[in-house]
């Protein structure tokens, strides 16, 4: 039974992603998502309640998928350099493998932050960033990474890849982001190494 619920919920999220991609969050209705997913009205409201809740759940689901890859890369890392490059590789690999989800995350954050679920989404997102910073903390304390304001690490480590992701996902850059994963990883390491 739990598998059925999980798969129905996932089907609704996949349908929502397709609808949001085609029509935007504002242009999508719950009925469009319901119709595309094949879910009943009761199932839609049981799992989510409204369109904003669906968008927030989709956003969090995408971030959770990315975060799992990121944490796996950190679990395999033996050095600060491995950790920095692993985080960049995780970001690039996730964006390349999930362009629709990545596009949704990059371009819907503002709309989601203004929704009823915005505060919850922001708190969960910050918690995931906190987990990554926890991994880096011993390396920072030991001088294996530059000591910087905590909020700067994300910009310096994934910033260049994130900027290129925006170009690639919008069609302004034609080369798949994955082709440059080592370029971005080297740049991140150069930015934060001591």
Image (cartoon, helix red, strand yellow):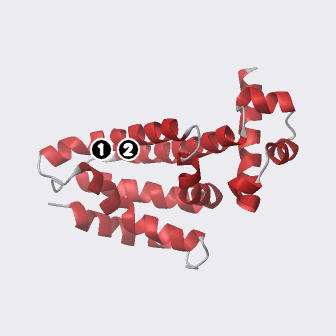
**Distance from label 2 to label 1 (Cα)?**
6 Å
Q: Nearer the viewer, residue 63 or 98?
A: 63
Above or below, comparing residue 153 to residue 72 in the picture: below
Mark 1 surroundings: few (<14), some (14-19) or many (≥20) residues within 10 A: some
SS label for mark 1: helix
Task: Name the quadrant of the C terminus.
Answer: bottom left
Task: Decide: few, some or many residues near mark 2? Use Cα within 10 Å; few <14, some 14-19, many ≥20.
Answer: some
Residue on which disc 1 sits: 133
Give the residue drawn at x 79%, y 43%.
30
Q: What residue do we see at 24% from left, 52% from top?
A: 80
Which label was assigned to residue 34? none
Query: Is any atom of residue 3 visible in this view?
Result: yes
Q: Position of residue 14 (x, y in %)?
A: 73, 46
Question: Is 83 left, or right, of 114 in this rendering?
Answer: left
Q: Quadrant of the N terminus?
A: top right
Residue 154: x and y, percent?
34, 55
- Residue 33 left/right relative to 77: right
Residue named by callout 2: 129
Based on the displayed image, in which of its 4 quarters is residue 40 positioned? top right
Picture layout, residue 43 above or below residue 52: above
Q: Secondary structure at mark 2?
A: helix
């Amino acid at each position: 039974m739990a598998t059925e619920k999980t798969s129905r919920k996932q089907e609704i999220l996949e349908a929502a992603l397709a609808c949001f991609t085609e029509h935007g969050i504002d242009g999508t209705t719950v009925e469009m998502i319901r119709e595309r997913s094949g879910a009943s009205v009761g199932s839609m409201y049981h799992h989510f309640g409204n369109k904003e809740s669906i968008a927030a759940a989709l956003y969090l689901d995408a971030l959770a998928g990315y975060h799992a890859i990121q944490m796996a890369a950190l679990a395999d890392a033996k050095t600060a350099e491995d950790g920095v490059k692993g985080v960049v590789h995780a970001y690039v690999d996730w964006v390349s493998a999930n362009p629709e989800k990545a596009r949704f995350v990059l371009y819907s954050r503002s709309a989601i932050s203004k929704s009823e679920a915005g505060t919850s989404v922001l708190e969960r997102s910050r918690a995931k960033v906190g987990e990554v910073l926890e991994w880096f903390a011993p390396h920072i304390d030991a001088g294996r990474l530059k000591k910087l304001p905590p909020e700067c690490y994300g910009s310096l480590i994934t910033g260049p890849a994130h900027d290129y992701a925006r170009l690639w996902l919008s069609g302004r850059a034609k080369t798949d982001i994955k082709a440059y994963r080592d370029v971005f990883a080297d740049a991140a390491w150069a930015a934060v190494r001591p």
